[in-house]
Image (cartoon, rainbow, N blue to C red):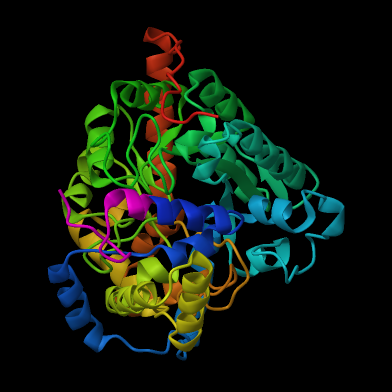
Amino acid sequence: MDIIQFNIIDCSINDRKLLIEKLKERFLISRRRFLEQTSFLGSSALFAQSLFASAAIASDGTAAVDPKLLDRAKALLEKAPLIDTHNDLPSMFLETKAGDLTSFDMSKVQPTLCADVPRMREGRIGAQYWSIFVESATQKSHTSLHEALREFDVALRFIQSTPDLEQARTADDIDRIHKAGRIACLFGVEGGHMIENSPAALRTFYELGARYMTLTHWDNIDWADSATDRPERFGLTEFGEKIVKEMNRLGMFADISHVSPDTMRDTLRVTRAPVIFSHSNAFAIDPHPRSVPDDVLQRMPANGGVVHVNFIREFVSPLNPAYQEKRTAALKNLHARFDTDDAITKGIAAWEKENAPPRGTISDVADHIDHIRKVAGIDHVGIGADFDDVALDSMAAGLENVTRYPYLFAELLHRGYSDEDVLKIAGRNHLRALRQMEKVAAELRKTEAPFIGEGVKAKWTS
């Protein structure tokens, strides 16, 4: 089992869980804020390794780029097409205007949103998976499915009301829409809690256009363990294995971002189709428990899946473990001085204001890609940026918004990646895996009936 250290003072597991729940409730709207409040560390050995590796990394992620390489990158991304497997714009529609799309002209730059058509065009995006995201804490109130349908609704209305966009359901659709000059749109369900243990809900999500489901989000669910919760199931339950197989039959990627390493391994053991990590990085570079360990990367070639690298600062910088260690010490000191949650929360917020976390750089993101290529192979790397706010410091420096993809690929070209390598990472690896998954699903539908059976909702009570 991987060594994972909770970034909370030395206390009992029950006390840790209670504090985490209070933080989630307080910051329910913003998962970014919750992520910052409940950080985790990997093993000390990997932490030391990351510090050593960072010595040669430039601090300026916006350093000058060779114009010729940038132009070459832009041309390749237009050809690829560039496929990003994770963007949280639908949640922003609901959070800012409760889903009222008349407030936004998406043909113009929208400074309050993480994406719009002009900036997507500038970034050379050819296909985008929009995330259907609902906090995993909604398991407790049994409102996950209801809130997921609100996200599907606003995402579908957004696509249907924007002439530059068109919904895609297959790999061929992506190619056709891209060649027609529009941006292909698909959906990814970010957390298996949203089906509320119902295969019927899973099938409904598929019909609405979901082509992957992340098995967990921040918390464990009844049938699978998360990377950022206390191990309870040690992977997938029998019901969880049946859900993965039903996803295979439907033609929906099992997405193993956010899940524990044991859940990753169980999913790879059970699946008959390629899996994806829709937005995950290499544990060897930044040992956050959300990242992918090398033994899992080594299994990707046999599976045919793809690891889509994200740009979020906490998962990018090799300096993050050192920062989190300092934050742990500050939090421990606050607990010694204060006895109320409010005082501790204000204290750590003040500390964070004076101690900015490391953001990482374009070079760091390229290092993650280098490592995944080295361990898994060039055919198993993609892009899943995970844009979900407009804060300038949320993402790696130089990758602040959806216009910046060409700069990352210019860095890869600078490192010696070939044109074919760039085309694969940008989108062709994903298209290949998607077509392979569709082929598996077509065969399974001939021989297997739908999974009819509801899971027991025993974990959460209203």
User: Residue at (66%, 42%) from the top-left corner?
Assistant: 151
The answer to whether residue 3 is magenta is: yes
Using the image, determine if residue 108 lies above or below residue 229.
below
Q: In this view, does 128 lie to the left or right of 252?
A: right
User: Residue at (34%, 78%) from the top-left corner?
Assistant: 333
In the rendered view of the protein, which quadrant contains the C terminus?
Answer: top right
The answer to whether residue 454 is magenta is: no
**Residue that sits furthest to the front in the current view:** 339
**Quarter assignment of residue 364:** bottom left
Q: Is residue 109 left or right of residue 268?
A: right
> Magenta segment range?
1-17
At which x and y percent is residue 311? 44, 67
Q: Is residue 422 left or right of residue 73?
A: left
**Quarter assignment of residue 275:** top left
At which x and y percent is residue 141? 58, 35
Residue 305 in view here: yes
Using the image, determine if residue 412 lies above or below residue 222.
below
At which x and y percent is residue 430? 42, 47
Count up the numbered dots. 0
